[in-house]
Amino acid sequence: MSDEPVVTVEQVYAVAKLFRLQWEPAQKAHVLLYPEGMVRLNQSAGEILKRLDGKQTIAQVVADCEAAFNAQGLEQDVLDFMAGAIRQGWVLRV
């Protein structure tokens, strides 16, 4: 049996309470702050995480990212990122 998180487009997530997502001008990137330190995020990760408001489904997050970046076919990339973010404890299902 796999311990790999199963993420579907119908699910809703939020950034875990242990973390605070913010734009960090010195890093020129979004970061996740937590008591022991900071995680510097790449642009894609920051864009996904800032949309996880505990209300939007993953499908809505994907659609918003595709519209914002005039892109298509981002669903699998977002699902893959979400699985990693769950493993890291960055996000929780609402």
Image (tube, rainbow, N blue to C red):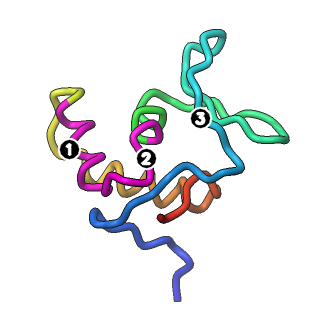
Q: Residue at 63% of width from left, 29% of height from top?
A: 40
Residue type (three-letter) at the residue carrying disc 2: Leu
Q: Name the residue under label 3.
A: 21
Gap in Å between the C-alphas at discs 1 and 3?
Answer: 21 Å
Q: Residues within 10 Å of mark 3 (few under 14, many from 20)?
A: many
As shown in the figure, which amino acid type bears the numbered disc 3? Leu
Figure check: 37 above or below 63: above
Which residue does the numbered mark 1 point to in the structure image? Answer: 63
> In which image quadrant can residue 51 be found?
top left
**How far apart are labels 3 and 2 at the CA level?**
10 Å
Residue 45 on the magenta segment: no
Q: Give the number of the disc on residue 52.
A: 2
- Callout 2: 10 Å neighbours few (<14), some, many (20+)? many
- The residue sitting at the right extreme is 36
Q: Position of residue 76 (x, y in %)?
A: 29, 55
Drawn side of residue 11 relative to residue 60, left or right: right
Residue 80 location (% of width, % of height): 40, 56
Q: Considering only order in the chain, which callout, 1 or 2, is on the residue closer to the N terminus?
A: 2
- Nearest to N terminus: mark 1 or mark 3: 3
Can you give x and y, in whole percent of width and height, for residue 69 in the image? 23, 27
Closer to the chain start, of discs 3 and 2, is 3
Callout 3: SS: strand
Tell me the residue at 67%/44% (across/down). 19
| Residue 37 left/right relative to 7 | right
Q: The disc labelled 1 sits on which kind of residue?
A: Ala
- In-front residue for pair 13/44: 13
Q: Residue furthest top?
A: 26
**In the drawing, what numbered circle is on residue 14?**
none
User: Residues in magenta?
Assistant: 49-67
Mark 1, Cα crowd under 10 Å, few <14 / some 14-19 / many 20+, is: some
Q: In this view, does 35 lie to the left or right of 60?
A: right
Residue appearing at x 41%, y 33% in the figure: 47
